[in-house]
Each structure stands twice: as C-alpha cells, then as structure tokens.
Amino acid sequence: MPDGDLRTRLFEKIPRNALTLALEGVNALIRPADNVYYQELDAKYKTVRCFLPALVEHIRFGANVAGEPVVAAFDWLRSNIARKKPGNDAPREVIRKPWQRHVLREDGSVDFHAYTFCVLDELHTALRRRDVFVAPSWRYADPRAGLLDGAEWEATRPIICRTLGLSAQPEPTLSALTNELDRTYRAVAARLPDNPAVRFDQVGDKQELVLSPLDKLDEPASLIALRERVAGMLPRVDLPELILEVAARTGFTDAFTHLSERTARATDLPISLCAVLMAEACNTGPEPLIRGDIPALKRDRLSWVDQNYVRDDTLTAANAILVAAQSRMALANLWGGGEVASADGIRFVVPVRTVHAGPNPKYFGVGRGVTWYNLISDQFSGLNDITVPGTLRDSLILLAVVLEQQTDLQPTQIMTDTGAYSDVVFGLFRLLGYRFSPRLADVGGTRFWRIDPQADYGLLNTISAHNLSLQKIIPHWDDMLRLVGSLKLGLVPATGIMRTLQVGDRPTRLAQAIAEFGRIDKTLHTLTYIDDEAKRRGTLTQLNRGEGRHSVARAVFHGKRGELRQHYREGQEDQLGALGLVLNMIVLWNTIYMEAALDQLRADGYTVKNEDVARLSPLLHEHINMLGRYSFSVPEAVAKGELRPLHDPADND
C-alpha cells in the first residue's frame, strides 16, 4: 500500500477510533472516585495503545498559531511512546485547566496516560476548528491551502502591505485603528447633544440608541422644471437603433471575439451582435428579430453569433468599454467620481426545472428563482454582476462582485442595504482597502465595540459595553495578510474562501480574528453614520440609484412575463449579462442626449443650476420603444457620429 494511502486511511479513522476513545476517557475522568478513574483510564489506554504507535508514526500534522501547542505535544508523544519511562519534559501548554488535576501529579510530574488522553482530546478539538490539519486529506486539510505561501509569500508580502496600506507586523496598524476609534468615539460623543436625530430610550434595564429616519428632501421648483424639460427633449428612439448607435459611438462590439480566437469578421457582424444582445436582454428570444431578407438577421446567422461570440469574457470586455465611455462624460462626473458603488439584487422567477434556482416563498411564491446581484457606480453604470440561485445568503457574494469587476472604475466605498453585512465582511473590506458602508435600518440593535474598557465616552458609555480583544487578531495577522493578498491578486475567488473561514457552522480562528478586526471598522462606520446626516443621505441616494436601475431592467426584460427560462447557470449568466450590457447602453445614450439637452437649454438662456443637474438621473425609458418595431438601421448622419435632433416637447406626435 502506498504510504500516502496508508496515512489517509489511518487518519480518516481517527474520529471513530482514537479521538472517540479519548472522549470516552474524558467521561471517565469526571467520575468522583479516583480509583474508578484510574481503572477506566487504564482500560481505555490499553485500547489506544494498540494503534497509537502506528498513528504517531505515519501521521504528520500541521498547525496554525493556535494549534502549534497541540502538534508539539503530539510530536512529544511520538518520541516517548516507545519508552518504558517517558521523560518529564512534555509540553505543558496543551494542558488546559480541566485536565490539570488529572495530568499533573502532586510533585509536578506528568501522568503519561492522562497526558495521552489530554493530547488526543485537544487534537480532536483542534481538528474540528482546523487549527490542526493533515495532508493528504480533503476533510481535514489546511483551510489556508491555496493562499500565498512560502518564498512566494515572503516576496509578495511587502508589495501587498504597501498596496493596501497595512503594516507587516500587526502593532502599527492596530495602534492606528485604536487611536482612530478613540478619536471617533470622543468626537461623536461631543456632538451628541447637538444631534437632533439621536436619542436614548430606556428598554427594560437597558438604554438603546434610537436614530430618527431621514426627512424627505423637498425638490425645488427649479429641479422639477429642469427634469421635465430634459426628459421632454430626449429623442424618441427604438431600442434596436439605440443599441446600434451606442455600438457606433463606442465600438463595444469589437470586444466580441470568436470562440476560436480567429480575427476574421463576418459582414455586418455588429448588427447580428446587437440583435442577439437585444433578444437576450428583452427575453423575447430571436424570433421577433429574424428577417429572411437581411443576411445579418437570418436565423442561422443569429444562432451562430450567439454560440460563438456571446460568453462571459466578451460580455465583461464589452461592459468595460461602456463603463469607460460613461466615465468620460462630463455630466456623469457631476453625478459622481466613480469612487462610490452600491450592490443590490433583483430577483427573477425561473419556471423551468433546474438545479440552478432556489426557493423563497416571499419572492418566488411556490416556485423557484435566482437573484441577479449587481454592483452599480455613482455614475449609474453597472460594473459587475453575479447570478445567485435563490436569494442571497452568503455575504461573501458581495465581496466577489466587488473584487471581480474588471472596469476602469475602482470604487473604494461600497454601500449595501441592511441585510448584506457581517463582522467578517467588514474586516475583509477594510483589509482590502475598501470602506464598507451599509445602510443601518436598526441602529439600536447594533453593537458598539471599544478597545479601551476604561475610556470615558460620555453618553455613549451605556451602549459601548462590548470589549474588543486585539490578542485575538495579533497571532493571526500574517494569515490575514496572506488571505487578503491572495484575494487581491485573484489567486483565490472570494466565493471560494468559505473553507478558509468556516468549518461546518463554526468559524475558524482566522475568521474569528478577521471578525474582531471587522468590529473595529463596523463601530467606526456606525458612529459616523449616526453623526453625519450627509453620509446617511448619500447612502440612501446611491441605493435608490440601484433601485431605479432595476426598474429599467424590468421594463427591458419584458418577454415571457419577465421570467428567466434558462436551465443552466451559464445560460442564466450570459442572458443576464446581456441585460446588464443593454442597461449600460441605455444609461450612456441617455447621458449623451441629456448633456446635449442641457447645453441647448443654456444656449437658449435657460437657468441651469449645477445642484439641480446633480440630482438628475439617466434611468429613463419612456422615450425608448421596446415593443413592436425591430429595425436594425440608423440614419447615416448618426452612424457617422452626429447626434439626433433633440425632441421638441411641444410636438405631441
């Protein structure tokens, strides 16, 4: 039998043999009569002694910082198990308090039998926590497998630390965060008496912080009038013409390459591509678009283009072109600089039989569906999307949609609605250089953490009773850097690190350290959130942009009752990717013509205020015809880059 197979077979029997017996020995230890204890222990030790030599000979354990004492004790057993009189130099860090009265004799020496059971018991616990691991094994492998390691990590560490603004040793970064948290507490506490949005209510024997909801901002008459004028001046256009016009202006169709990577282009390929994208985005299928008298719109051409050109990498590349075009628009830069983005999901019922859909009676009734999770910039462009079966449960999806976006925009502040955050997500975002800013619907239920238990934070003392322990972070700092470095470099996907962070329903020690780090940033966010009305309004504004984009998505995705009927995940992702692409085309087209309308209004002497322009939105679709007419042609002047004539609001035709 190969040595690797022997190690694997021996190891996979550990929970049922050695470690089960160890736990039985623990049960015997709790009996009050010492003579019973020794009889039980001797009986169990004889059984363990039958296979323990083979176990220590063939199994080599690895460990993280928390598991190193266990491995050291196990190695000591390996070198002493064959001796008639084992040495008295056994590592004692593994002997926790419940074991001390059984393992340590009155003279300070170690009872070898009891020590063996103590080590096996601690080994069992450490294996479940993945503080100790073994190879080869799938079930008990190192949860950090796949992360940067060895010489590669030593060479990469300085670059990662410099890029993310972190120190190689934990103390400088943690000291800076400690000072930032203390300053924020004191500044917010000092302004509390003058903050009308915050009050404290007595709930039972506790005081809870209550944050008043935001009042609706009144829209000035100038904004209402400007919005109506601009919307009325947008040209009336059919969706196929809009798509072709954006293709002519941006050249996004060049991003669609043949699956075989051949460079030859079919005649009128952009027309075929635009037709396929529209068929997918509108959920109508190709039938309404097929024209037997136009080669680019024949059935076989559209099928060939769909199979060979539309896929994840080409959709991503085309989307990057559209996002870059939007970010160059002066009007888009009035809406935002690209530093802010929000993530939210829109749900689609999937009425066909598929394993790539999940139930949720609230959203899908008796059926099943998917959630299309989007990352949207403050310039209204969609940066990335992920299709999730059912509804979002794993908050790491949020991290994935941020890290895996491939546009020129690099947002640093990420906003979400209330449900999509956890301490671990806060920690990972802060380590990766982002500021995570979820909307907090119930601040009263949020925990406020502190590092200095003696600090006086005035009115905030009553709600900041939870103490952080930096000692939970310091031993795992290097592994935390390895994890975020591996994520940043794309060596591991964000959705694939659950094995690193969790074993069953128990977080690993590394996850606990990241969560403790995240509690610092979550408390900083919560403090500034209750202190700054502008921050709360900014978060709400950005989330409303996401909701507005989803409304346009519903209007575009009108075919087949708005239900997604793809059986396979790849088909779901490609179809919803095409929808995202068409949404970005609509946003870009609207921005272009809104900018032209504003220029015309200024030229006509109309007063246009920048503060009103900043509150306009390109998420309009009433002027876009998506039904009935599918003519893939544009006026010659428009094809050459000229703008369409603006619409005369007085013309009711």
Image (spheres, grey):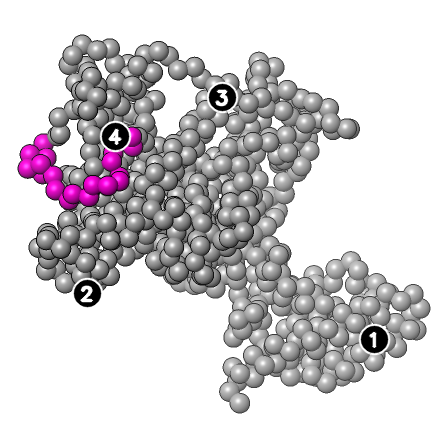
Q: Amino acid at mark 3?
A: Glu
Based on the displayed image, in which of its 4 quarters is residue 32 positioned?
bottom right
Residue designated by label 2:
260
* Secondary element at image label 1: helix
* Element assignment for label 2: loop
Q: CA distance from mark 3 to mark 2?
A: 54 Å
Question: Which circle's residue, 3 or 2, is located before the other in the chain?
Answer: 2
Q: CA distance from mark 3 to mark 1?
A: 65 Å
Task: Assess disc 2: are there few (<14), some (14-19) or many (≥20) residues with their C-alpha within 10 Å of its C-alpha.
Answer: few
Left or right? Give the position of 633 relative to 572: left
Looking at the image, which is closer to me, 609 or 37? 609
Which residue corresponds to mark 4? 623
Q: Is residue 153 magenta?
A: no
The location of residue 190, given as percent across then percent down, is 58, 18
Residue type, numbered disc 1: Leu
Query: Mark 3: which secondary structure?
Result: helix
Discs 3/2, front: 2
- Identified by mark 4, the residue type is His
Tell me where residue 226 appears, x and y as whole percent.
28, 16
- Contact (Cβ within 8 Å) of mark 2 with mark 1: no
Range shown magenta: 621-642
Look at 32% across and 41% down and name the residue there.
556
Q: CA distance from mark 4 to mark 3?
A: 35 Å
Q: Which mark is residue 41?
A: 1
Q: Which residue is mark 3?
A: 533
